[in-house]
Protein backbone atom coordinates (compact mmCIF):
# COMPACT_ATOMS: atom_id res chain seq x y z
CA UNK A 1 0.00 0.00 0.00
CA UNK A 2 3.01 2.26 0.36
CA UNK A 3 4.96 2.93 -2.79
CA UNK A 4 7.83 4.98 -4.08
CA UNK A 5 6.03 6.28 -7.10
CA UNK A 6 6.93 7.68 -10.44
CA UNK A 7 3.29 7.23 -11.34
CA UNK A 8 0.26 6.35 -9.28
CA UNK A 9 -1.29 2.91 -9.63
CA UNK A 10 -5.05 3.38 -9.71
CA UNK A 11 -7.73 0.74 -9.63
CA UNK A 12 -11.50 0.66 -9.59
CA UNK A 13 -12.91 -1.45 -6.79
CA UNK A 14 -16.31 -3.12 -7.00
CA UNK A 15 -17.19 -4.28 -3.49
CA UNK A 16 -20.02 -6.81 -3.15
CA UNK A 17 -23.49 -5.34 -3.15
CA UNK A 18 -24.80 -7.92 -0.71
CA UNK A 19 -23.46 -9.04 2.64
CA UNK A 20 -22.58 -12.70 3.09
CA UNK A 21 -23.91 -12.69 6.63
CA UNK A 22 -26.47 -15.23 7.71
CA UNK A 23 -29.95 -13.68 7.54
CA UNK A 24 -31.34 -12.13 10.70
CA UNK A 25 -34.88 -12.48 9.48
CA UNK A 26 -36.47 -10.10 7.04
CA UNK A 27 -38.48 -7.34 8.68
CA UNK A 28 -41.19 -6.20 6.30
CA UNK A 29 -41.05 -2.51 7.06
CA UNK A 30 -40.47 0.78 5.32
CA UNK A 31 -37.24 1.22 7.30
CA UNK A 32 -35.87 -2.12 6.14
CA UNK A 33 -36.75 -1.47 2.50
CA UNK A 34 -35.21 2.02 2.75
CA UNK A 35 -32.00 0.72 4.33
CA UNK A 36 -31.76 -1.95 1.63
CA UNK A 37 -32.06 0.63 -1.13
CA UNK A 38 -29.43 2.84 0.51
CA UNK A 39 -27.09 -0.12 0.99
CA UNK A 40 -27.37 -1.07 -2.68
CA UNK A 41 -26.75 2.52 -3.74
CA UNK A 42 -23.69 2.68 -1.50
CA UNK A 43 -22.31 -0.46 -3.09
CA UNK A 44 -22.78 0.97 -6.56
CA UNK A 45 -21.22 4.30 -5.62
CA UNK A 46 -18.26 2.63 -3.91
CA UNK A 47 -17.63 0.63 -7.04
CA UNK A 48 -16.97 3.92 -8.84
CA UNK A 49 -14.41 5.19 -6.34
CA UNK A 50 -10.81 5.32 -7.50
CA UNK A 51 -8.13 4.46 -4.96
CA UNK A 52 -4.35 4.38 -4.94
CA UNK A 53 -2.72 1.03 -4.32
CA UNK A 54 0.77 0.33 -3.12
CA UNK A 55 2.72 -1.99 -0.82
CA UNK A 56 4.44 -1.41 2.52
CA UNK A 57 7.30 -3.19 4.13
CA UNK A 58 5.44 -4.45 7.21
CA UNK A 59 6.55 -3.73 10.75
CA UNK A 60 4.46 -5.18 13.50
CA UNK A 61 6.05 -4.04 16.73
CA UNK A 62 7.68 -0.90 18.08
CA UNK A 63 10.74 -2.33 19.79
CA UNK A 64 12.75 0.80 20.40
CA UNK A 65 12.49 4.56 20.72
CA UNK A 66 13.95 6.98 18.20
CA UNK A 67 13.99 10.76 18.45
CA UNK A 68 15.79 12.90 15.89
CA UNK A 69 16.62 16.52 16.65
CA UNK A 70 19.07 19.09 15.32
CA UNK A 71 19.97 19.74 11.71
CA UNK A 72 19.32 17.32 8.90
CA UNK A 73 23.08 17.13 8.34
CA UNK A 74 23.86 16.08 11.92
CA UNK A 75 21.01 13.69 12.63
CA UNK A 76 21.81 10.23 13.88
CA UNK A 77 20.92 7.27 11.72
CA UNK A 78 19.55 4.17 13.37
CA UNK A 79 18.11 0.94 11.99
CA UNK A 80 14.58 0.03 12.93
CA UNK A 81 13.18 -3.46 13.42
CA UNK A 82 11.55 -4.86 10.29
CA UNK A 83 9.01 -7.00 12.10
CA UNK A 84 8.39 -9.58 14.78
CA UNK A 85 6.05 -12.36 15.73
CA UNK A 86 3.74 -12.14 18.75
CA UNK A 87 6.05 -14.43 20.70
CA UNK A 88 9.23 -12.42 20.03
CA UNK A 89 7.83 -8.90 20.28
CA UNK A 90 9.32 -6.74 23.03
CA UNK A 91 7.78 -3.37 23.76
CA UNK A 92 9.61 -0.74 25.81
CA UNK A 93 8.41 0.29 29.26
CA UNK A 94 7.66 3.76 27.93
CA UNK A 95 5.34 2.34 25.28
CA UNK A 96 3.29 0.66 28.01
CA UNK A 97 2.18 4.07 29.24
CA UNK A 98 0.25 4.61 26.01
CA UNK A 99 -1.71 1.58 24.86
CA UNK A 100 -5.04 0.31 23.60
CA UNK A 101 -7.78 -0.42 26.13
CA UNK A 102 -10.57 -1.70 23.87
CA UNK A 103 -10.82 -3.03 20.33
CA UNK A 104 -13.81 -3.85 18.09
CA UNK A 105 -13.85 -5.58 14.71
CA UNK A 106 -16.30 -4.64 11.99
CA UNK A 107 -16.94 -5.59 8.38
CA UNK A 108 -13.43 -5.04 6.91
CA UNK A 109 -12.34 -2.50 9.54
CA UNK A 110 -11.20 -2.14 13.16
CA UNK A 111 -11.87 0.53 15.78
CA UNK A 112 -9.74 0.86 18.92
CA UNK A 113 -9.76 3.01 22.06
CA UNK A 114 -6.41 4.28 23.33
CA UNK A 115 -5.52 4.88 26.96
CA UNK A 116 -5.47 8.66 26.46
CA UNK A 117 -9.15 8.64 25.44
CA UNK A 118 -8.53 8.96 21.70
CA UNK A 119 -10.18 6.65 19.14
CA UNK A 120 -8.38 5.13 16.14
CA UNK A 121 -9.50 3.15 13.11
CA UNK A 122 -7.90 1.13 10.34
CA UNK A 123 -9.10 -1.05 7.48
CA UNK A 124 -11.55 -0.20 4.71
CA UNK A 125 -12.81 3.30 3.97
CA UNK A 126 -14.57 2.85 0.61
CA UNK A 127 -17.95 3.52 2.23
CA UNK A 128 -16.70 6.00 4.81
CA UNK A 129 -16.32 3.38 7.54
CA UNK A 130 -13.45 5.23 9.20
CA UNK A 131 -15.54 8.34 9.94
CA UNK A 132 -12.72 10.78 9.17
CA UNK A 133 -14.74 12.84 6.70
CA UNK A 134 -18.18 13.18 5.15
CA UNK A 135 -16.71 13.15 1.65
CA UNK A 136 -13.18 11.69 1.56
CA UNK A 137 -12.91 8.01 0.65
CA UNK A 138 -9.84 5.85 0.14
CA UNK A 139 -9.45 2.13 -0.21
CA UNK A 140 -7.78 1.07 3.04
CA UNK A 141 -5.12 1.71 5.65
CA UNK A 142 -3.27 -0.50 8.12
CA UNK A 143 -1.79 2.59 9.76
CA UNK A 144 -4.29 3.85 12.36
CA UNK A 145 -6.02 7.16 11.69
CA UNK A 146 -7.35 9.24 14.57
CA UNK A 147 -11.09 9.92 14.61
CA UNK A 148 -11.62 13.70 14.72
CA UNK A 149 -13.48 15.58 17.47
CA UNK A 150 -13.35 12.69 19.95
CA UNK A 151 -11.50 12.97 23.26
CA UNK A 152 -11.79 11.59 26.81
CA UNK A 153 -13.61 8.57 25.39
CA UNK A 154 -14.32 5.79 27.88
CA UNK A 155 -16.12 3.17 25.75
CA UNK A 156 -16.65 2.31 22.08
CA UNK A 157 -18.83 0.02 19.98
CA UNK A 158 -19.34 -0.69 16.28
CA UNK A 159 -22.25 -2.22 14.40
CA UNK A 160 -19.98 -4.13 12.04
CA UNK A 161 -21.55 -2.33 9.09
CA UNK A 162 -19.51 0.88 9.42
CA UNK A 163 -21.54 2.70 12.11
CA UNK A 164 -19.67 3.30 15.38
CA UNK A 165 -20.41 4.85 18.76
CA UNK A 166 -18.38 6.26 21.64
CA UNK A 167 -19.10 7.47 25.16
CA UNK A 168 -17.12 10.44 26.45
CA UNK A 169 -16.28 11.04 30.09
CA UNK A 170 -19.06 13.63 30.36
CA UNK A 171 -21.67 10.96 29.49
CA UNK A 172 -22.35 12.20 25.96
CA UNK A 173 -22.64 9.72 23.07
CA UNK A 174 -21.01 10.30 19.68
CA UNK A 175 -21.60 8.55 16.36
CA UNK A 176 -19.49 8.34 13.20
CA UNK A 177 -18.75 6.14 10.20
CA UNK A 178 -21.10 4.77 7.54
CA UNK A 179 -20.29 7.86 5.50
CA UNK A 180 -20.35 10.52 8.20
CA UNK A 181 -17.92 12.44 10.38
CA UNK A 182 -18.43 12.39 14.18
CA UNK A 183 -21.52 14.05 15.64
CA UNK A 184 -23.22 13.94 19.01
CA UNK A 185 -26.28 11.75 19.51
CA UNK A 186 -28.81 14.27 20.79
CA UNK A 187 -30.63 13.66 24.04
CA UNK A 188 -28.11 11.46 25.88
CA UNK A 189 -25.95 13.08 28.56
CA UNK A 190 -25.48 10.33 31.16
CA UNK A 191 -24.36 7.23 29.24
CA UNK A 192 -21.99 4.62 30.61
CA UNK A 193 -21.70 2.20 27.69
CA UNK A 194 -23.07 1.88 24.15
CA UNK A 195 -23.97 -0.92 21.75
CA UNK A 196 -24.08 -0.15 18.03
CA UNK A 197 -26.22 -2.39 15.85
CA UNK A 198 -27.04 -2.56 12.14
CA UNK A 199 -30.72 -1.71 12.71
CA UNK A 200 -30.93 -0.30 16.22
CA UNK A 201 -28.43 0.95 18.81
CA UNK A 202 -28.58 1.23 22.58
CA UNK A 203 -27.06 3.26 25.40
CA UNK A 204 -26.68 1.94 28.94
CA UNK A 205 -27.18 4.91 31.22
CA UNK A 206 -25.40 5.54 34.49
CA UNK A 207 -28.60 4.84 36.44
CA UNK A 208 -28.77 1.29 35.04
CA UNK A 209 -31.55 1.92 32.51
CA UNK A 210 -31.37 1.52 28.73
CA UNK A 211 -32.36 3.75 25.81
CA UNK A 212 -32.46 2.66 22.17
CA UNK A 213 -32.79 4.36 18.79
CA UNK A 214 -32.80 3.40 15.13
CA UNK A 215 -29.33 3.25 13.61
CA UNK A 216 -29.10 5.86 10.83
CA UNK A 217 -28.71 4.52 7.28
CA UNK A 218 -25.57 4.71 5.18
CA UNK A 219 -24.80 8.28 4.08
CA UNK A 220 -23.73 8.53 0.48
CA UNK A 221 -20.83 10.86 -0.42
CA UNK A 222 -21.68 14.40 -1.51
CA UNK A 223 -25.37 13.97 -0.70
CA UNK A 224 -27.74 15.34 1.93
CA UNK A 225 -29.63 12.39 3.34
CA UNK A 226 -32.46 13.62 5.59
CA UNK A 227 -32.91 10.24 7.26
CA UNK A 228 -29.17 10.02 7.97
CA UNK A 229 -29.04 13.47 9.57
CA UNK A 230 -32.31 13.71 11.49
CA UNK A 231 -32.38 13.71 15.28
CA UNK A 232 -32.86 10.16 16.60
CA UNK A 233 -35.98 9.22 18.54
CA UNK A 234 -34.90 7.74 21.86
CA UNK A 235 -36.93 4.97 23.50
CA UNK A 236 -36.54 3.94 27.14
CA UNK A 237 -36.74 0.14 27.39
CA UNK A 238 -39.49 -0.70 29.85
CA UNK A 239 -38.75 -3.29 32.53
CA UNK A 240 -35.00 -2.68 32.68
CA UNK A 241 -33.10 -1.40 35.71
CA UNK A 242 -29.80 -2.25 37.38
CA UNK A 243 -28.39 -3.20 33.96
CA UNK A 244 -24.61 -3.67 33.62
CA UNK A 245 -24.32 -4.73 29.96
CA UNK A 246 -26.31 -4.83 26.71
CA UNK A 247 -25.92 -6.64 23.39
CA UNK A 248 -27.93 -6.65 20.16
CA UNK A 249 -28.79 -9.13 17.42
CA UNK A 250 -30.87 -7.60 14.67
CA UNK A 251 -33.97 -6.13 16.34
CA UNK A 252 -33.52 -8.32 19.43
CA UNK A 253 -31.96 -6.64 22.44
CA UNK A 254 -30.47 -8.34 25.51
CA UNK A 255 -29.55 -6.89 28.88
CA UNK A 256 -27.53 -8.35 31.75
CA UNK A 257 -28.59 -7.17 35.18
CA UNK A 258 -26.48 -6.78 38.29
CA UNK A 259 -28.13 -9.85 39.86
CA UNK A 260 -26.88 -12.10 37.01
CA UNK A 261 -30.20 -12.41 35.21
CA UNK A 262 -30.59 -11.82 31.46
CA UNK A 263 -33.52 -9.96 29.93
CA UNK A 264 -34.65 -9.49 26.34
CA UNK A 265 -36.80 -7.12 24.33
CA UNK A 266 -37.60 -6.50 20.67
CA UNK A 267 -37.09 -3.09 19.13
CA UNK A 268 -39.54 -1.57 16.66
CA UNK A 269 -38.78 -2.38 13.02
CA UNK A 270 -40.51 0.67 11.57
CA UNK A 271 -40.79 4.41 12.13
CA UNK A 272 -43.12 5.34 14.98
CA UNK A 273 -43.05 1.89 16.57
CA UNK A 274 -42.15 1.23 20.19
CA UNK A 275 -39.87 -1.42 21.70
CA UNK A 276 -41.53 -4.25 23.58
CA UNK A 277 -41.28 -4.51 27.38
CA UNK A 278 -38.23 -6.46 28.50
CA UNK A 279 -38.77 -9.91 30.02
CA UNK A 280 -36.37 -12.34 31.72
CA UNK A 281 -34.85 -15.31 29.90
CA UNK A 282 -35.45 -18.51 31.85
CA UNK A 283 -32.53 -20.76 32.68
CA UNK A 284 -29.84 -18.08 32.67
CA UNK A 285 -28.67 -17.25 36.20
CA UNK A 286 -25.40 -16.03 37.73
CA UNK A 287 -24.37 -14.66 34.35
CA UNK A 288 -21.37 -12.30 34.18
CA UNK A 289 -21.15 -11.53 30.44
CA UNK A 290 -23.32 -11.77 27.31
CA UNK A 291 -22.70 -11.36 23.58
CA UNK A 292 -24.74 -11.65 20.40
CA UNK A 293 -23.87 -10.10 17.02
CA UNK A 294 -26.20 -11.45 14.36
CA UNK A 295 -26.29 -14.91 15.94
CA UNK A 296 -27.75 -16.65 18.99
CA UNK A 297 -27.21 -15.22 22.46
CA UNK A 298 -24.18 -16.55 24.32
CA UNK A 299 -23.69 -16.14 28.05
CA UNK A 300 -20.82 -16.67 30.50
CA UNK A 301 -21.62 -17.65 34.10
CA UNK A 302 -19.71 -16.99 37.32
CA UNK A 303 -18.08 -20.44 37.14
CA UNK A 304 -16.46 -19.75 33.78
CA UNK A 305 -18.93 -21.84 31.76
CA UNK A 306 -20.33 -20.65 28.43
CA UNK A 307 -23.96 -21.25 27.43
CA UNK A 308 -25.62 -20.84 24.05
CA UNK A 309 -29.33 -20.38 23.45
CA UNK A 310 -30.77 -22.76 20.84
CA UNK A 311 -33.67 -21.99 18.47
CA UNK A 312 -36.14 -22.96 21.21
CA UNK A 313 -34.55 -20.49 23.61
CA UNK A 314 -33.06 -23.19 25.82
CA UNK A 315 -29.52 -22.97 27.12
CA UNK A 316 -27.00 -25.43 25.69
CA UNK A 317 -23.49 -25.94 27.14
CA UNK A 318 -20.70 -24.65 24.90
CA UNK A 319 -17.18 -26.09 25.34
CA UNK A 320 -17.45 -26.62 29.08
CA UNK A 321 -14.02 -28.27 28.98
CA UNK A 322 -12.67 -24.69 29.01
CA UNK A 323 -12.83 -22.28 31.93
CA UNK A 324 -13.57 -18.96 30.27
CA UNK A 325 -13.18 -15.36 31.48
CA UNK A 326 -14.60 -13.55 28.43
CA UNK A 327 -15.73 -14.18 24.86
CA UNK A 328 -17.13 -12.65 21.70
CA UNK A 329 -19.19 -14.06 18.85
CA UNK A 330 -20.19 -13.14 15.33
CA UNK A 331 -22.93 -14.80 13.31
CA UNK A 332 -20.40 -17.41 12.12
CA UNK A 333 -17.93 -18.19 14.88
CA UNK A 334 -16.98 -17.73 18.54
CA UNK A 335 -13.81 -16.55 20.30
CA UNK A 336 -13.20 -17.74 23.87
CA UNK A 337 -10.57 -16.39 26.27
CA UNK A 338 -9.67 -18.77 29.10
CA UNK A 339 -8.72 -17.75 32.61
CA UNK A 340 -5.12 -18.53 31.57
CA UNK A 341 -5.29 -15.86 28.86
CA UNK A 342 -5.39 -18.34 25.98
CA UNK A 343 -7.66 -17.85 22.94
CA UNK A 344 -9.81 -20.51 21.26
CA UNK A 345 -11.86 -20.13 18.09
CA UNK A 346 -14.77 -22.36 17.06
CA UNK A 347 -17.29 -22.42 14.21
CA UNK A 348 -16.75 -20.99 10.74
CA UNK A 349 -13.55 -19.29 11.88
CA UNK A 350 -11.66 -16.59 9.97
CA UNK A 351 -8.78 -18.95 9.14
CA UNK A 352 -10.80 -22.15 8.81
CA UNK A 353 -9.01 -23.68 11.80
CA UNK A 354 -10.64 -24.75 15.05
CA UNK A 355 -9.28 -24.66 18.57
CA UNK A 356 -6.44 -22.83 20.27
CA UNK A 357 -4.63 -19.89 18.67
CA UNK A 358 -1.13 -21.01 19.61
CA UNK A 359 0.59 -17.69 18.96
CA UNK A 360 -1.47 -15.73 21.52
CA UNK A 361 -1.03 -15.57 25.30
CA UNK A 362 -1.88 -13.25 28.20
CA UNK A 363 -5.01 -12.04 26.37
CA UNK A 364 -7.66 -10.06 28.26
CA UNK A 365 -10.28 -9.47 25.55
CA UNK A 366 -11.27 -10.43 22.01
CA UNK A 367 -13.49 -9.21 19.19
CA UNK A 368 -15.01 -11.35 16.46
CA UNK A 369 -15.08 -9.33 13.26
CA UNK A 370 -16.82 -10.94 10.31
CA UNK A 371 -13.69 -11.74 8.29
CA UNK A 372 -10.98 -11.02 10.86
CA UNK A 373 -10.42 -11.59 14.57
CA UNK A 374 -8.81 -9.35 17.16
CA UNK A 375 -7.25 -9.87 20.57
CA UNK A 376 -6.16 -7.38 23.24
CA UNK A 377 -3.26 -8.41 25.49
CA UNK A 378 -2.75 -7.36 29.10
CA UNK A 379 -0.08 -4.83 28.07
CA UNK A 380 -2.51 -3.08 25.72
CA UNK A 381 -1.29 -4.38 22.36
CA UNK A 382 -3.76 -5.43 19.66
CA UNK A 383 -3.30 -8.58 17.57
CA UNK A 384 -5.20 -9.33 14.37
CA UNK A 385 -5.57 -12.37 12.13
CA UNK A 386 -7.82 -13.81 9.42
CA UNK A 387 -9.10 -11.92 6.39
CA UNK A 388 -6.94 -8.91 5.57
CA UNK A 389 -8.17 -7.75 2.15
CA UNK A 390 -8.41 -4.17 3.42
CA UNK A 391 -5.63 -4.51 6.03
CA UNK A 392 -8.23 -4.67 8.79
CA UNK A 393 -6.01 -7.06 10.76
CA UNK A 394 -3.61 -4.17 11.31
CA UNK A 395 -0.81 -4.93 8.84
CA UNK A 396 -0.38 -5.86 5.18
CA UNK A 397 -1.42 -9.45 4.42
CA UNK A 398 1.27 -12.02 5.16
CA UNK A 399 -0.19 -14.87 3.08
CA UNK A 400 -1.68 -15.22 -0.42
CA UNK A 401 -5.31 -14.30 -0.88
CA UNK A 402 -5.16 -11.38 1.53
CA UNK A 403 -4.84 -13.56 4.64
CA UNK A 404 -3.04 -13.37 7.97
CA UNK A 405 -2.74 -16.81 9.60
CA UNK A 406 -0.31 -15.91 12.39
CA UNK A 407 -1.55 -12.91 14.43
CA UNK A 408 0.21 -9.63 13.69
CA UNK A 409 0.54 -6.71 16.07
CA UNK A 410 -1.37 -3.59 15.05
CA UNK A 411 0.35 -0.25 15.19
CA UNK A 412 -0.20 2.36 17.85
CA UNK A 413 -1.60 5.39 16.04
CA UNK A 414 0.89 8.28 15.78
CA UNK A 415 -0.14 11.84 16.71
CA UNK A 416 1.34 14.80 14.83
CA UNK A 417 1.83 18.14 16.60
CA UNK A 418 2.68 21.24 14.60
CA UNK A 419 3.84 24.22 16.68
CA UNK A 420 2.24 22.70 19.76
CA UNK A 421 -1.16 21.97 18.19
CA UNK A 422 -2.54 18.51 17.44
CA UNK A 423 -2.88 18.10 13.69
CA UNK A 424 -6.09 16.37 12.65
CA UNK A 425 -5.39 14.67 9.35
CA UNK A 426 -7.64 12.39 7.32
CA UNK A 427 -4.45 10.60 6.27
CA UNK A 428 -2.33 8.78 8.87
CA UNK A 429 1.35 8.89 9.70
CA UNK A 430 2.79 5.64 8.32
CA UNK A 431 5.50 3.70 10.14
CA UNK A 432 7.57 1.63 7.71
CA UNK A 433 10.57 -0.61 8.22
CA UNK A 434 12.89 2.39 7.72
CA UNK A 435 11.22 5.52 9.04
CA UNK A 436 7.94 7.37 9.60
CA UNK A 437 6.20 8.85 6.58
CA UNK A 438 3.96 11.92 7.02
CA UNK A 439 1.14 13.26 4.77
CA UNK A 440 3.19 16.13 3.42
CA UNK A 441 0.40 18.26 1.91
CA UNK A 442 -1.44 18.34 5.24
CA UNK A 443 1.77 19.18 7.09
CA UNK A 444 2.61 21.97 4.62
CA UNK A 445 -0.85 23.51 5.03
CA UNK A 446 -0.50 23.52 8.83
CA UNK A 447 2.94 25.13 8.59
CA UNK A 448 1.94 27.70 6.03
CA UNK A 449 4.42 26.12 3.61
CA UNK A 450 3.91 25.41 -0.10
CA UNK A 451 4.14 21.89 -1.51
CA UNK A 452 4.09 21.43 -5.29
CA UNK A 453 4.18 18.45 -7.63
CA UNK A 454 6.02 19.06 -10.90
CA UNK A 455 5.40 16.96 -14.00
CA UNK A 456 7.03 16.41 -17.36
CA UNK A 457 5.51 14.38 -20.21
CA UNK A 458 2.69 13.30 -17.90
CA UNK A 459 5.03 11.90 -15.22
CA UNK A 460 6.12 13.35 -11.89
CA UNK A 461 9.58 14.88 -12.35
CA UNK A 462 10.11 16.26 -8.84
CA UNK A 463 8.51 17.84 -5.78
CA UNK A 464 9.27 21.12 -4.07
CA UNK A 465 8.53 22.23 -0.52
CA UNK A 466 8.96 25.96 0.27
CA UNK A 467 8.99 27.41 3.78
CA UNK A 468 10.22 30.88 4.73
CA UNK A 469 13.49 31.33 2.83
CA UNK A 470 14.21 27.63 2.27
CA UNK A 471 13.20 25.31 -0.53
CA UNK A 472 13.49 21.53 -0.68
CA UNK A 473 13.57 19.67 -4.00
CA UNK A 474 13.27 15.91 -4.25
CA UNK A 475 12.74 13.46 -7.11
CA UNK A 476 10.65 10.28 -6.99
CA UNK A 477 12.50 7.12 -5.91
CA UNK A 478 15.62 9.02 -4.82
CA UNK A 479 17.22 8.64 -1.38
CA UNK A 480 18.36 12.24 -1.19
CA UNK A 481 16.99 15.76 -1.42
CA UNK A 482 18.49 19.20 -1.94
CA UNK A 483 18.05 22.28 0.23
CA UNK A 484 18.65 25.80 -1.04
CA UNK A 485 17.96 29.28 0.30
CA UNK A 486 15.94 32.08 -1.26
CA UNK A 487 17.76 34.70 0.81
CA UNK A 488 19.58 36.89 -1.74
CA UNK A 489 21.49 38.80 0.99
CA UNK A 490 23.05 35.69 2.49
CA UNK A 491 23.33 33.09 -0.26
CA UNK A 492 24.27 29.57 0.84
CA UNK A 493 25.57 26.67 -1.15
CA UNK A 494 22.98 24.06 -2.07
CA UNK A 495 23.09 21.08 0.30
CA UNK A 496 22.42 17.46 -0.64
CA UNK A 497 21.03 15.43 2.27
CA UNK A 498 20.58 11.67 2.39
CA UNK A 499 17.34 9.90 3.30
CA UNK A 500 16.66 6.34 4.40
CA UNK A 501 13.50 6.14 2.30
CA UNK A 502 12.19 8.05 -0.75
CA UNK A 503 9.10 10.20 -0.85
CA UNK A 504 6.06 7.98 -1.39
CA UNK A 505 2.29 7.58 -1.62
CA UNK A 506 -0.15 6.07 0.85
CA UNK A 507 -3.93 5.86 0.48
CA UNK A 508 -3.82 8.57 -2.17
CA UNK A 509 -1.76 10.98 -0.05
CA UNK A 510 1.80 12.00 -0.95
CA UNK A 511 4.02 11.22 2.04
CA UNK A 512 7.55 12.20 3.01
CA UNK A 513 10.00 10.89 5.62
CA UNK A 514 9.48 12.96 8.76
CA UNK A 515 13.13 13.99 9.04
CA UNK A 516 13.05 15.59 5.58
CA UNK A 517 11.26 18.50 7.26
CA UNK A 518 14.45 19.28 9.15
CA UNK A 519 15.78 20.63 5.88
CA UNK A 520 13.38 23.54 6.36
CA UNK A 521 15.19 24.53 9.55
CA UNK A 522 12.52 23.03 11.83
CA UNK A 523 12.90 20.99 15.00
CA UNK A 524 11.36 17.61 14.13
CA UNK A 525 11.19 14.81 16.71
CA UNK A 526 9.65 11.35 16.47
CA UNK A 527 9.12 9.77 19.87
CA UNK A 528 8.31 6.27 18.72
CA UNK A 529 7.33 4.81 22.09
CA UNK A 530 5.00 7.73 22.79
CA UNK A 531 3.58 7.53 19.24
CA UNK A 532 4.13 11.24 18.73
CA UNK A 533 5.77 13.51 16.16
CA UNK A 534 6.46 17.15 17.00
CA UNK A 535 7.26 19.78 14.38
CA UNK A 536 8.31 23.16 15.79
CA UNK A 537 9.97 26.30 14.59
CA UNK A 538 13.47 26.87 15.96
CA UNK A 539 13.51 29.71 18.51
Image (cartoon, rainbow, N blue to C red):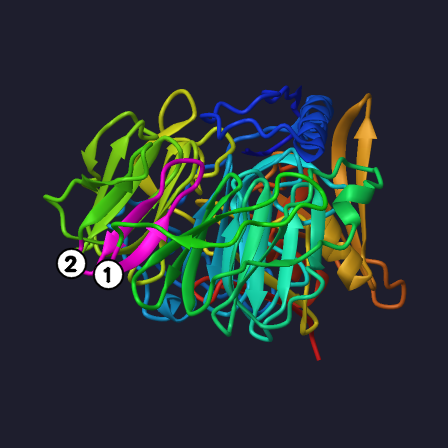
Left or right: 302 in relation to 404 = left
**Front in this rendered view, residue 75 or 54:** 54
Q: Earlier in the sequence, mark 2 or mark 1?
A: 1
Q: Residues within 10 Å of mark 2 (few under 14, many from 20)?
A: few
**Quadrant that contains the N terminus:** top right
Left or right: 234 in relation to 88 = right
Tell whether position 294 is magenta. Answer: yes
Residue designated by label 2 = 303
Residue 130 percent location from the top left of the image:
61, 45
The image shows residue 477, relative to residue 517, as above or below, that is above
Residue 247 visible from this viewpoint: yes
Residue positioned 59% across, 34% down in the render = 4
Tell whether position 132 is magenta. Answer: no
Residue designated by label 1 = 286
Residue 429 percent location from the top left of the image:
58, 51
Residue positioned 72% across, 31% down in the render = 34
Q: Are marks 2 and 1 in contact (CB under 8 Å)?
A: yes
**Quadrant that contains the C terminus:** bottom right
Q: Quadrant of residue 223?
A: top right
Residue 388 percent location from the top left of the image:
44, 32
The image shows residue 424, relative to residue 473, as above or below, that is below
Residue positioned 41% across, 60% down in the render = 245
Residue positioned 86% across, 64% down in the render = 487
Q: Which residues are magenta?
A: 285-304
Secondary structure category for the residue under label 1:
loop
Residue 7 visible from this viewpoint: no
The nearer-to-camera label among 2 and 1 is 1
Residue that sits furthest to the right in the current view: 488
Amino acid sequence: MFSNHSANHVTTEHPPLYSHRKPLGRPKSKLFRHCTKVGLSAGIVSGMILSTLSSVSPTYAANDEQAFTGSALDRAVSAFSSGSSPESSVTSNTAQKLHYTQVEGGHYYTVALRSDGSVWKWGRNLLGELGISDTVRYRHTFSPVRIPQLSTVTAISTSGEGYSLAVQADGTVWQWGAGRAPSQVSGITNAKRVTAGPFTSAALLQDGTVQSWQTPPQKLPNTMNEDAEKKPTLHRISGLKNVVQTTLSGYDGYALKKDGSVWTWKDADEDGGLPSKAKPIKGLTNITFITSKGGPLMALDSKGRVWRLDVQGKRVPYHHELKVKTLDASSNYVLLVTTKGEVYSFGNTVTGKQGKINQLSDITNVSAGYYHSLALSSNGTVWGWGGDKYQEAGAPATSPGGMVYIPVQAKLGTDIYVNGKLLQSIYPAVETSETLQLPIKTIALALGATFEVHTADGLISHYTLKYNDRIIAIKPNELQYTVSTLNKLDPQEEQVIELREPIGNYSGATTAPYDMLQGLGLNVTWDRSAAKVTIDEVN
